[in-house]
Amino acid sequence: MKVALLSAAVLGGQLAMPVSDRVPHLNVEALCKATVADDKANGVVLGQSLEKCMSDETDAQRQLSALWSATTGPVRDRCEAEASSIPDAQSYVDLLSCIQSADGASPSSPPPLKGASKKRSAQ
């Protein structure tokens, strides 16, 4: 019985994709909403809309899908940890920027994305 369970666990484990082999799921909507609310509270006249923020995050997620498998595991792990370290401040734009800078890719080649990046004030 134990052998059967162990065999099933081992075989089932081989069929499952390790978490680091796929782009992580980030809760970017929370950060986009918070960013828009902060802009309004601070009187930012030309603040980014929720729709534009979400669009930028979706674009960054698509770009990540293309880069993810070509990026080394340690870089993915480090960048994912940085991008998801704060539960309500997760951003695909930040994750994409981290991977592009770690791999030496030119961050200016894709269109500039703001999203809800925690680094957007530096841009």
Image (cartoon, rainbow, N blue to C red):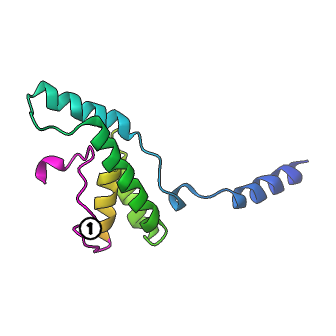
Say left or right for 15 vs 112: right
| Residue farthest along the top direction in this orientation | 41
Q: Which residues are magenta?
A: 103-123
Amino acid at circle 1: Ser
> Which x, y percent locates residue 57?
34, 48
Does 29 appear above or below 64? above
- Is residue 110 in the magenta section? yes
Residue at the image position 33 percent from the left and 39 percent from the top: 86
Front-most of 2 and 103? 103
Does 36 appear above or below 107? above
Residue at the image position 51 percent from the left and 58 percent from the top: 20
Judging by the rendered image, the residue that carries numbered circle 1 is 101
> Which x, y percent locates residue 33?
29, 31
Residue at the image position 31 percent from the left and 49 percent from the top: 56
- Is residue 12 in the magenta section? no
Front-most of 58 and 81? 58
Q: Quadrant of the C terminus?
A: bottom left
Front-most of 35 and 85? 35
Q: Main secondary structure of the magenta part?
A: loop
Neighbor class of circle 1 (other Cα within 10 Å; few <14, some 14-19, many 20+) is few
Front-most of 48 and 26? 48
Residue at the image position 75 percent from the left and 55 percent from the top: 12
Is residue 88 visible to us here?
Answer: no
Place residue 118 in its image quadrant. top left
**Number of marks:** 1
> Which x, y percent locates residue 101?
26, 67
